[in-house]
Image (cartoon, rainbow, N blue to C red):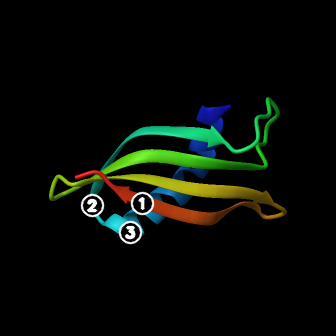
Amino acid sequence: MEEVLIFELRPKILSIIRKEYGEYLLDNARILPIKKSGKYPQQEFIFKGRVTKQDSTSDIIRITFKAGFGGYKVSDFHAQRLN
């Protein structure tokens, strides 16, 4: 299920990250369900990953998605500096 959500939302996720960071490297990407559910689609979840910028500094990012009639919408973006 996690891989399906990441694949489905990949263009939206990459667009958000590119807008915030320009050139970057993304790793440790995963989906964190807000409400545990074995059903697809998840109604609300967090995409979490580590973004490394060209200057070698890194942030942990969290993008919260909520399901709606038009698909998933971003409801929150949060970045935490690591270096």
The label nearer to you, 1 versus 2, is: 1
Residue ID for mark 1? 79
Q: Which residue is mark 3?
A: 20
Question: x, y percentage for residue 23?
Answer: 27, 60
Q: Are marks 3 and 2 in contact (CB under 8 Å)?
A: no
- Position of 30 with respect to 51 (left or right) is right
* Quarter of the rendering containing residue 73: bottom right
Give residue 47's mark. Answer: none
Work out whether residue 49 or residue 3 is closer to the camera in this orientation and state it. 49
Quadrant, the N terminus: top right
Residue nearest the observer in this picture, 36 or 5 = 36
- For the point 60% across and 51% down, which residue is it? 9
> Which amino acid lies under the numbered mark 2 shown in the image of this protein?
Glu
Direction from residue 56 to residue 30 in the image, left or right: right
The span from disc 1 to disc 2 (Cα, nearest Å) is 16 Å
The x, y position of residue 52, in whole percent, is 27, 51
Q: Residues within 10 Å of mark 1 (few under 14, many from 20)?
A: some
27 above or below 51? above
Where does residue 8 sit, x and y in percent of width and height?
63, 46
Q: Amino acid at mark 3?
A: Glu
| Crowd band around label 2 with a 10 angstrom C-alpha radius: few (<14), some (14–19), many (20+) | few
Q: Which residue lies at the image location 78% right of the left edge and 42% below the top edge?
A: 41
- Circle 1 SS class: strand
Frontmost of labels 3 and 1 is 1
Q: Amino acid at mark 1?
A: Ala
- Left or right: 33 in relation to 55: right
